[in-house]
Amino acid sequence: MGEFRRSKNAIIGGVCGGIAELLDWDPTLVRIGYVLLSILSAAFPGILVYLILWLVIPGPED
């Protein structure tokens, strides 16, 4: 496995794209899964976790 970084394949912050690249999954499926998980957990925790990950995970390599 590679290093966990945010992805250049980003819609908002690159967090889901980075997870998809790390696990070699389709980024769209990871995004859909994250949104569904966030909605099922009353949305706020999912948004908060995403923002924290966005701040903590290093950006994409150039």
Image (spheres, grey):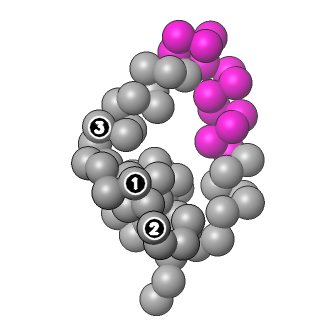
Q: Residue furthest bottom?
A: 62
Q: Amino acid at mark 1?
A: Leu
Residue 17 visible? The answer is no
Q: Which mark is residue 29?
A: 3
Q: Position of residue 18 (x, y in %)?
A: 46, 59
Element class at badge 3: helix
Type of secondary structure dominating the magenta stretch: helix
For image coordinates 68% across by 21% down, the residue present is 44
Q: Which mark is residue 46?
A: none
Q: Amino acid at mark 3?
A: Leu
The residue tagged 2 is: 1
Cα distance in 3D space between marks 1 and 2? 7 Å
* Range of magenta residues: 39-51
Crowding at dot 1, Cα within 10 Å, few <14 / some 14-19 / many 20+, comes out as some
Is disc 1 in contact with disc 2, using a CB cutoff of under 8 Å? yes
In the rendered structure, the answer to whether residue 9 lies left or right of residue 16 reads: left
- Of 11 and 18, nearer the camera is 18
Crowding at dot 2, Cα within 10 Å, few <14 / some 14-19 / many 20+, comes out as few
Element class at badge 2: loop
Q: Position of residue 22 (x, y in %)?
A: 44, 60
Q: Can you tell which of label 1 and label 3 is closer to the viewer?
A: 1
Q: Is residue 33 above or below residue 54?
A: above
**Magenta highlight on residue 27:** no
Q: Which mark is residue 23?
A: 1
Which of the marked residues, 2 or 3, is nearer the chain's N terminus? 2
Quadrant position of residue 38: top right
Question: Where does the N terminus fall, quadrant-wise?
Answer: bottom left
Q: Is residue 12 above or below residue 5?
A: above
Crowding at dot 3, Cα within 10 Å, few <14 / some 14-19 / many 20+, comes out as few
